[in-house]
Amino acid sequence: MSPLDHDRRVRLTAFDWLQHQVDLHGDVLPRSVLAEGFEFDGVAVPLVGPQGIFKPRILAEVPLSITTAPKGPYHDRFEANGLLLYAYRGTDPQHHENVGLRRAWERRVPLVYFHGVLQGKYVPAWPVFVVGDDPSTLTFTIAVDDARHVGTGIEEVAQGRRLDDSETGANARREYITATFRQRVHQRAFRERVLRAYREQCALCRLRHQELLDAAHIIADTEPEGDPVVPNGLALCKLHHAAYDRYFLTVRPDYVIEIRQDVLDEEDGPMLLHGLKGLHHQRIVLPRSRELYPDPARLERRYERFRMGS
């Protein structure tokens, strides 16, 4: 098997393995799972290492993944056009990790990107491509693409030619996909912070199955005060999230649940009785830290809307 075929097989196996992990865990993956990785021809292949630019031993020259750690030492950031500026390792453009990532750019080799939303939790994106290198600012430019273009670059190099991204319309597509990924990262970060604050349980019914929990905005993120911060959030199970969004119920500024009067008057079986009516005038579960409590001013604004519609 040629080195190029070997490299391609490892990457495609990594991408398939990641899809399986997302299907199992959702799109926020624990670092422990990524560090354990998968097996390829009897060899263990982790997807992350101590450094952000990571090349497992099974690959010869080009890294497999890049990582932005939460509160890490490097200032990776998204640009206005949606693309990611990823910091060099250190300040030497010829550091071997920077050289490896530069090879990924030159050869159009697809990588995996992990964005840390909390300590030990990462949102993955693949394939991602290095689309620029600027030694003067010690940054690479990174773009997320979709799975249909995972082979772009590998096949071109195999055929002895280099494809100009501008000829394929890749730039606009990648800017859009990367911007969408950035939005997803922000949403997942908000969810993880809110669920952690509420100790992974619904603030209303105390359900603890994370797969059935959401982070609900008190003030919608489309509004001026709808910041993705914990005091603008409530950890709710999917049933109570839907009921909250549709004003079947609300949480008053004193942290007491109030059910809409027409719902209280309705007769519709045990789910309505225990799932909604039984919560009326109960106090919600609150975070341990008072700094993370729901903001009373935001709750008041929401309560006013609830009363106008009830």
Image (tube, rainbow, N blue to C red):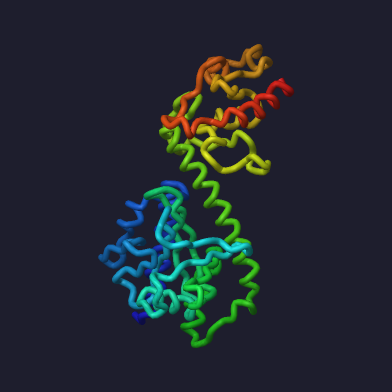
- Residue drawn at point x = 61 percent, y = 18 percent: 259
User: For residue 14, what is the image quadrant?
Assistant: bottom left
User: For residue 50, what is the image quadrant?
Assistant: bottom left
Considering depth in this image, is 187 or 23 the residue closer to the camera?
Answer: 187
- Residue drawn at point x = 56 percent, y = 15 percent: 280
- Residue drawn at point x = 63 percent, y = 77 percent: 166
Report whether residue 199 is seen. Answer: yes
Considering depth in this image, is 218 or 161 the residue closer to the camera?
Answer: 218
Whole-percent x and y of residue 152? 52, 74
Q: Residue furthest left?
A: 42
Q: Is residue 161 above or below residue 69?
A: below
Whole-percent x and y of residue 288? 41, 30
**Tally of numbered discs:** 0
- Residue drawn at point x = 48 percent, y = 29 percent: 202
Horizontal relation, residue 142 to residue 55: left or right: right
Whole-percent x and y of residue 90? 39, 71
Report whether residue 201 is seen. Answer: no
Q: Is residue 49 above or below residue 280?
A: below
Whole-percent x and y of residue 197? 44, 35
Q: What quarter of the picture does the C terminus occupy?
A: top right
Q: Residue furthest right?
A: 308
Q: Is residue 71 above or below residue 152?
A: above
Q: Residue furthest bottom?
A: 160
Q: What quarter of the picture does the N terminus occupy?
A: bottom left
